[in-house]
Image: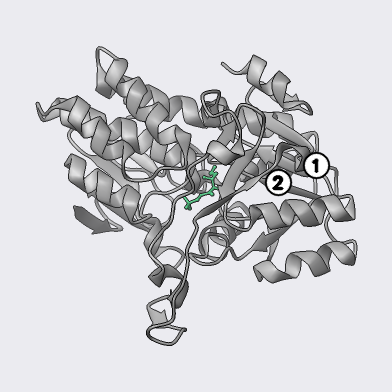
Amino acid sequence: MTRSRGAGAVDGEGGRTKESEHAVTDDPIPPTLEWAGDRVRYIDQRLLPGELVVAEARTVPEVCDAIATLAVRGAPAIGAMGAFGVALAAVRGEDTAAAGEALIATRPTAVNLAWGVQRALAADDPVAEACRIAEQDVATNRALGGHGAALVPDGARVLTHCNAGALACVGYGTALGVIRAAHEAGRAVHVWVDETRPVLQGARLTAWELQRLGIDATLVADVMAASLMASDEVDLVVVGADRIAANGDTANKIGTYGVAVLAHHHGVPFYVAAPSSTIDPATPNGGAILVERRDPEEVCVVAGRRIAPEGIRAENRAFDVTPAELVTAWITEAGVFHRFADALAARS
Ligand code: MRU
């Protein structure tokens, strides 16, 4: 893996890669991933918000490592990264099927990963297909954001969990895409950003994105959501998703289910924003979704500093499942659906 800080890859202030064929234009957030002929360029999300570093993966193991270590994370982003991994194998004359297996094995919960890998494997030209997936991701998120923005009234106070922004995709974002589209439509929006323990995607990534976009935001500890809702300071919740089962049960970052229960108790609408590629008709319900268990050290060590005694047992479930009955509506590129069966039927 090669890293470049600033010059040569990204200018460090939201610039575009020189060799980019697929860069998102006019965007304060640089593309999360880009194909660069014989390698993939990606923002190393582990280093944000301190440093905006564009790293490069030239081999399938390097792509696998970037996904497994959360340098590239977020369901649509790992879908595109998986497709680029297959593209790299093809360019290097390697066994693409074996590459696909290794890529899919890196993270089990987000269905987008297998979706991206399989699309690239099935194509005559995996490079062209991977680039298409990346381009389509941004268009899909803009469409999804446009539909969802109608649910965000002027002056809305919106709570979100984890990072479902541009960084979690190739560009624009899903849950943050909805917020962003409302902001771009001229509406005042205030975002409560859950910090999102243990890996702090909210504090590190969502807060960074919202600052760059000029969207008013306040960072809160995850445990504050109940208090905010009790004092009537949340008008709606919007989150992303990693896998949506055939009955609408929705896996997303650990802690999402608790937010959904709170929202239900307080009569706050709870929206899930995700591309159709996150819907998995082959998984009948949430009980059949495999939830990734990550290294317990992520719970015990924050920003390199140990916060728990050596030897304490810790558990680190990366996701939880929100039952469909707690979801007010699902927002996809095809529209806003209050019944999940309609979202399933409309998927492209
Ligand atoms: O472990 P992560 O950071 O990959 O988890 C990401 C999430 O849970 C996101 O909310 C989800 O992937 C939706 S991203 C548009």
- Mark 2 close to ligand 1, CB under 8 Å: no
Instruction: Please name whichever residue, 186 or 271, is drawn nearer the observer in this view of the structure.
Output: 271
Pointer 1: residues within 10 angstroms few (<14), some, or many (20+)? many
Which is nearer the eye, 341 or 19?
A: 341
Please, is residue 97 above or below residue 73 in the view? above
Left or right of residue 177: residue 158? right
- Is residue 273 rendered to the left or right of residue 28? right
Q: Circle 2: is it few (<14), some (14-19), or many (20+) Cα within 10 Å?
A: many
Give the spatial CA distance, label 2 vs label 1: 10 Å
Quadrant occupied by the C terminus: top right
Residue type at mark 1 is: Val
Residue at 30% across, 50% down: 66
Q: Earlier in the sequence, mark 2 or mark 1?
A: 1
- Residue occupying image coordinates x 36% and y 21%: 119
The residue tagged 1 is 152
Q: Is residue 242 visible?
A: yes
Q: Which residue is mark 2?
A: 238
Q: Position of residue 211 (x, y in %)?
A: 60, 59
Q: Nearer the viewer, residue 53 or 268?
A: 268
Asked if residue 235 shows in the view, the reply is no
Task: Give the side of residue 114 with respect to residue 246, left or right.
Answer: left
Q: Where does residue 239 sit, x and y in percent of width and height?
A: 65, 46
Question: Which residue type carries mark 2?
Answer: Val
Q: Quadrant of residue 89?
A: top left
Direction from residue 194 to residue 77 in the image, left or right? left
Mark 2 vs mark 1: give the one in front.
2
Asked whether disc 2 touches disc 1, contact meaning CB atoms under 8 Å apart, the reply is yes
As helix, strand or loop, the secondary structure at mark 1 comes to loop
Q: Residue furthest top?
A: 124
